[in-house]
Amino acid sequence: GLAYEDLRAVKPDVIMVSMPALGLEGPWSNYISFGPGTDALGGLSSITGYKNGQPHKPGNFYADHNSGFHVATGIMAALFRRYKTGEGQHLEIVLREATMSVIGEYFIEYQFTGKEPKRIGNDHPVFFPHGIFQCKGDDSWIAISIESDHEWQTLCEVIESAELKNDKTLFEVSSRRLNREKIELEITGWTKSKSNKEAMNLMQTRGIRAGIVAKASDILSDAHVSERKYLDTVEHPDAGEYTSPGLPFKFAKSSTNLGMRAPMFSEHSLSILSDLLARDTSTIDSLIEKGTTPLEPIDRVYS
């Protein structure tokens, strides 16, 4: 393939990005990995899971998404440096290291205590109650987080539990943790009598951090999301019309609802080669014939 030095010889200020799983150098540089493996190698899976249970992978391929953010930031920094110095450079964004960068507090914890960080599921190291509670309806849940003693008293009022509110042994978070089963049963008894949206509204009205565990159907029908015009309607030749997440940022003077679909296979290949790269017809035909730029999907055997 084309190395950075090859590209630099043609365009000295070129900025090139490489995204190996484990790095271009080091004993494991030739190893391969995808998202789930990189999540595990980066330490994220070791802290994901329930107390006394086995490690789990995150809900999505976190290493892939997280590394993409680092790439965007790295490119912007490289562009700024090129603006200041006129020099390009080679960026290396390693998926494993990008994953490690978001759990730095766990490395510090181990160095200070000498103990491996524990998996705590939906718990929080400080707040309690803190977790996911079942609500009325099919697969209906709510997340609740109580930070202060005042919030605890308010929660007791919302769930109409005079017993918990008046129990002086539960006034401090440390004592509440010792009565976990009793407290969580009381909360669940109340949440199971309400839909998750009803429970969330009642708690939010009183200043308690609570949110429904939103499913795809909830998000697509969410009035708040709709009013913010975050979702984008897209027309696709194969899939038809569908709604997809838009860009997670807004500009004051331009729209981020592009209505653009992903391109079909090789849809823009010819225009890029001829218009953008100014290649002649014979060169383009040669690239297509060699399979370098195929216009139809081809089977490849990787070794």
Image (tube, helix red, strand yellow):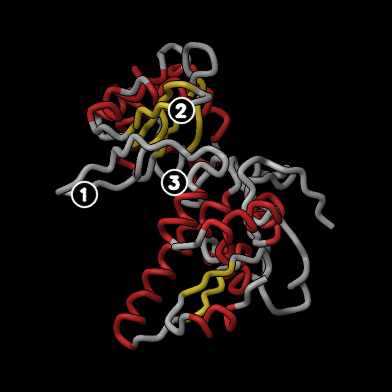
Q: Is residue 275 left or right of residue 16?
A: left
Is 295 drawn above or below residue 222 in the view shown?
Answer: below
- Binning the other alpha carbons within 10 Å of mark 3 as few (below 14), some (14 to 19) or many (20 upward) gives some
Q: Which amino acid type corresponds to the residue marked 3 in the rendered image?
A: Phe
Q: Which residue is mark 2?
A: 236
| Residue 297 picture location, percent across and down | 67, 41
What label sits on residue 127 in the rendered view?
3
Picture quarter with the N terminus: bottom right
In this picture, is 15 found above or below 67?
A: below
Residue at image point 70% right, 60% down: 41
Residue 254 in the image: x percent, y percent?
19, 46
Q: Position of residue 39 (x, y in %)?
A: 65, 54
What's the CA distance linking mark 1 and mark 2? 26 Å
Mark 1 is surrounded, within 10 Å at the Cα level, by few (under 14), some (14 to 19) or many (20 or more) other residues, namely few
Q: Which mark is residue 251?
A: 1
Q: Residue furthest right?
A: 303
- Foreground: 278 or 132? 278
Q: Residue furthest left?
A: 253
